Amino acid sequence: MAVLRFKQIKEINAEDLEKRLQELRLELAKEMTNVRTGRPIKNPGKIGELRRAIAKILTFKEQKKRLKASTKFVNVKEVKEVKKSTKKQTGGKE
């Protein structure tokens, strides 16, 4: 299994992302079962890699959800006005 990067996660649509998350969770459960039953592991780093991939997907989903929530109530004109007033107060530096 290759390392899952945020760039790749951003390109995947929501349905496929959910499907991928379920696959990763199932694979992690299988690997953890093998460890608990005492079977030898072919690749010990795979468990950590799976956990990180799951965490990346969950982090991406949470960021996306928070972004939607924060932009839901923000008016674009208000944001521009705030930026302009900040520049005036700081002398052109943000």
Image (tube, rainbow, N blue to C red):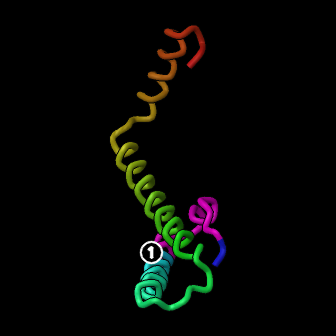
What is the x, y in percent for residue 71?
Answer: 40, 43
Seen at 37% across and 43% down, the residue is 70
Q: Tell me if residue 69 comes above or below residue 51 in the rendering.
A: above
Q: Quadrant of residue 93?
A: top right
Magenta-colored segment: predominant secondary structure: helix
What is the x, y in percent for residue 55?
Answer: 47, 63
What is the x, y in percent for residue 56?
Answer: 51, 61
* Picture mark count: 1
Local SS, label 1: helix
The one nearer the camera, 6 or 82, is 6
The one nearer the camera, 91 or 55, is 55
Q: Tell me if residue 85 comes above or below residue 32 in the rendering.
A: above
Report the residue marked by disc 1: 18
Seen at 49% across and 27% down, the residue is 80
Q: Residue furthest right?
A: 2
Q: Quadrant of residue 37?
A: bottom left
Asked if the magenta segment contains residue 12, the reply would be yes
Instruction: Check disc 1: other Cα within 10 Å, few if <14, some if 14-19, many if 20+.
Output: some
Q: Is residue 20 left or right of residue 93?
A: left
Position of the C terminus by quadrant: top right
What is the x, y in percent for residue 58?
Answer: 43, 63
Asked if the magenta segment contains residue 18, the reply would be yes
The amino acid sitting under disc 1 is Glu
Position of the N terminus by quadrant: bottom right
Seen at 45% across and 57% down, the residue is 59
Over which residues does the magenta segment extend? 3-19
